[in-house]
Amino acid sequence: MLQCCFSMVVLRTEGLKKRFGAVHALRGVSLELRRGQALGVVGPNGAGKTTLLHIILGLITPTEGLVECFGLELWSHRSQVLRRMNFASNYAGLPLSLTPWENLMVYALMYEVPRARRRCQEMLQRFGLWHLRDVPSRRLSSGQMMRLALAKALLNEPELLLLDEPTAGLDPSSARASRQMLRELKARRGLSLLYTSHNLAEIQEVADEVMLIWEGQVAAHMPTQELLRRYRSLEEFFFRRLRQ
Amino acid sequence: MNPRRVAAVLLRQVYLYRRSFPRLLEVFYWPTVDILLWGFVSLYLQRSQQGLAEFVAFFLGALILWDVLFRAQQGISVSFLEDLWARNLINIFASPLRAGEYMAGLLLISIVKVVIAFLVMSALAGLFYSYSIFSLGASLLPLVLNLVAMGWAIGVLTTALILRFGQEAEVLAWALAFLFMPFSAVFYPVETLPPALQAVARFIPSAHAFEGMRAVLATGAFPTERLLWASALNALYLGASLVLFARIFRYALKRGIIPKIGE
């Protein structure tokens, strides 16, 4: 059943350009992400990775180009599309004055999650935050906050998950557990992932394909397996490509 | 407009206030201080100026109604600032919530804050000065609605300006309403103002509302003309501020302001 759906394109961008005044943040990025596929986006700081994510999330309008999610054009079906996706970022906090339970309840309503209370409980238990459910989030460690952000990101059982350096604040065991869970969701539910990280080993572990963005352009895009055949590691690929 | 998503915006603020004693204090503290301080001042003035029998009624009525406008405005702009300070706007606007639904949620929060402040001030005015704002009779509701509408117009305008200019503009959330206060003739009749400022006051909805309130207290007559003027001006200003917010929101999407605001 899942296998037959792997060919379904969940995200397609075509010729995506974004200019902020004189700065060209993106210079024509095209990509396609299929159901159950994980695309790792790598690149140096300021390359345009986060701008790309923000455009796909509907937080920035592109200067030119198309974003299509689940076969629907993003800007004309914004709410419909965003209900089926979610995101977590190391840079976007959840309100610290609210408890983990309250934060999840607010977003459960916002994403129209059915049986919200049960779902929030499930997510808090899955991310090991159930015992902290009534503690103000400001008292959580940065790792626990990131786990809460991931719990919020999976609350609506998204078909497409956008992650911007999601394990940046996590200790190695929590980061590994998160990656493990994402791989499971990908395999079991056909979750598609668009993943940016500076942790190249992590991208190598999670992503089926890797895209290198350099000065707003796609400098390379290939399956992780092929990349590992041609280079010893993603790190070697990254530095050799950047030197070129 | 999806009611569940609008309710989410309201719920976020309910959780925030339920959990935060300083914020709760702010809801009750200023209305209490205002009514106690200015109530006793007006009592003193009434006793020393024997001819002004309605002085307390004029003054306390004006004070309570001004607070309605101010709380309505704060309910929108401070709630927006709460999301900005928490760097939560990125989560909010990356969700299915539409900008219009977010604004509708802020308007609901504003109603809750107005009701609380109004009840606190009315109760204290009754307790300490035997004054009832309900002596305004049938005029009270349209007067309150007009002041809420003007508070919303200022609140939406403030929010749009903060979104456009960032945190540097957050002072407007506390200051902008007071810019209208002298022209609103809250505590004195419009005719007290110099002729040029009287002309300005004609275009301020709250000036008509406060003139209407004084007319009710003085003559008991329903201030139809004043209320019609206030309603027409409010419809115009609230509509204009919502259009401005929508335009600035589109500008913010174009310039990538939302992910950066509050950083």
Image (cartoon, rainbow, N blue to C red):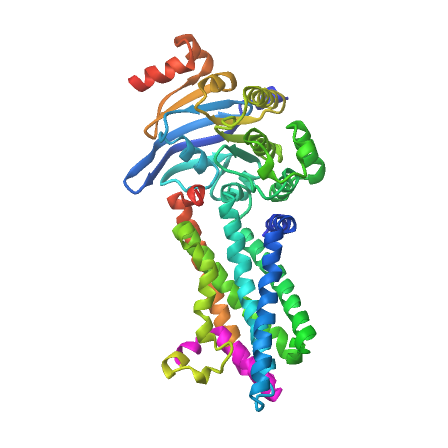
Q: Quadrant of residue A244?
A: top left
Q: Quadrant of residue A198?
A: top left
Residue A110 % position (x, y): 60, 44
Instruction: Please tell me how many numbered marks the rendered image carries.
Output: 0
Name the quarter where the C terminus of chain B is drawn.
top left
Q: Quadrant of residue A46?
A: top left
- Give the side of residue B51 with respect to residue A28, left or right: right
The residue positioned 59% from the left and 53% from the top of the image is B22
The residue positioned 59% from the left and 66% from the top of the image is B33
The overriding secondary structure of the stretch rendered in magenta is: helix
The residue positioned 52% from the left and 19% from the top of the image is A206
Residue A71 % position (x, y): 51, 34
- Give the side of residue B137 with respect to residue A94, left or right: right
Pick whichever, A29 or B162, lies toward us: B162
Pick whichever, A68 or B176, lies toward us: B176
Looking at the image, can residue B247 be seen? Answer: no
Say above or below: B86 vs B221. above
Q: Is-magenta flag for residue B149?
A: no
Pick whichever, A101 or A76, lies toward us: A101
Q: Which residues are magenta?
A: B199-227
- Give the side of residue B80 with respect to residue A102, left or right: left
The residue positioned 56% from the left and 52% from the top of the image is B101
Say above or below: B125 vs A229. below
Residue A63 % position (x, y): 36, 41
Looking at the image, can residue A106 be seen? Answer: yes
Q: Is-magenta flag for residue B223?
A: yes
Residue B48 % position (x, y): 56, 86
Say above or below: B194 vs B117. below
